[in-house]
Image (spheres, helix red, strand yellow):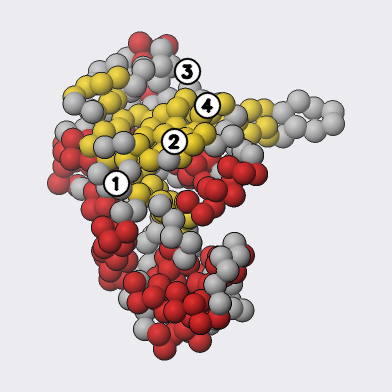
Amino acid sequence: MSAFISIKDVHKVYPVGAGLLRAGHALHAVRGVSLEVPRGGTYGLVGESGSGKSTVAKIIMGAERPSAGAVQIDGRAMDGSQRALAWLRTCLQPVLQDPYGSLNPTLRVRELIDEPLRIHRKGLGARQMTLRVNHLMEQVGLPEALASRHPAELSGGQKQRVAIARALALAPQCLVLDEPVSALDVSVQAQVLNLLQDMQVASSLTYLLISHDLAVVAHMSDYVGVMYLGTVQEQGPVESVLEAPRHPYTRALIAAAEPARGSLTAALQGEVPSPLRPPSGCAFHPRCPLATQRCREKAPPLRQVAPAHFAACHHA
């Protein structure tokens, strides 16, 4: 399966605390990340808060420029030019975490969904626009009667369906799903995830899924990448990574999500180190029960440990 999204050795560094009379510090939010999202498939990127996964998503969406490294979408180099960004905005669309905050409360549902079509001047007449919005609402399971309502009159699940319909308005090839169900009630989450899967099959969509929830990643993804402190610690087919994890951090995440598998490793100790002062050697070694002197001195490369399965651990 060919890659729809490909990023190679991507870095993102933010200057912090710089002023007229003092030098700043470098915050390394993303450090040498490489990954490929298969065309028509789903790549789940998982990790604790501050791991860098949302920064990777912003770089892929063109909202941030990488400090170093290369990004390709559908074979095109994303060089930051206006031409590349204009094409990217029709090819790739986000579905954000908070449907309560991502929808303009002054607009009605119909206006929210047709807004991308109006902004990008698709040349649709009034009747064509109405038919397009009605079709999108039908696709995401929203009754036409809701078209005249404001977001405040909708449930959380209905708001997220509006956000999905709006993302699909320009017929993109890829959706970036940034915690798409974390703000929803548990009873509604499965409905939205199943809707996204149905949409993917119907329209051959590619998904990049950002989540801290391993259950969501396991349900949705074909491939998974596990991030920690700006680096990918493990990646591969979702069955291989989640059923036979090779990195202690992945094992700890699984043990936290599934207490019955707690024997995989000791519980995580301490807090995520500051990206302003990352540890020497392996980024995970201060919290790792398997850490040795080698781990403290030398960062392990991401190496193949099973078919299509890679881990950055000296002990994998």
Q: Is residue 155 visible?
A: no
Marks 4 and 2, the one that precedes in the sequence:
4
For badge 1, the amino acid type reads Gly
In contact (CB < 8 Å): disc 3 and disc 1: no
| Residue neighbourhood size for the residue with mark 2, other residues' Cα within 10 Å, grouped as few (<14), some (14–19), many (≥20) | few
Place of residue 68 in the rendered image (x, y in percent of width and height, measured from the top left): 57, 26
Q: Nearer the viewer, mark 4 or mark 2?
A: 2
Q: Is residue 208 left or right of residue 260?
A: right
The residue at 60%/29% (across/down) is 67
Q: Residue furthest right?
A: 20
Q: In this figure, which residue is indicated by the disc labeled 3?
A: 280
Query: Residue 75: which disc?
Result: 2
For badge 4, the amino acid type reads Gly
Place of residue 22 in the rendered image (x, y in percent of width and height, measured from the top left): 79, 27
Marks 3 and 2, the one that precedes in the sequence:
2
Q: In this figure, which residue is indicated by the disc labeled 4?
A: 69
Marks 4 and 1, the one that precedes in the sequence:
1
Q: Is residue 91 left or right of residue 267?
A: right
Q: Is residue 270 above or below residue 300?
A: below
Q: Nearer the viewer, mark 3 or mark 1?
A: 1
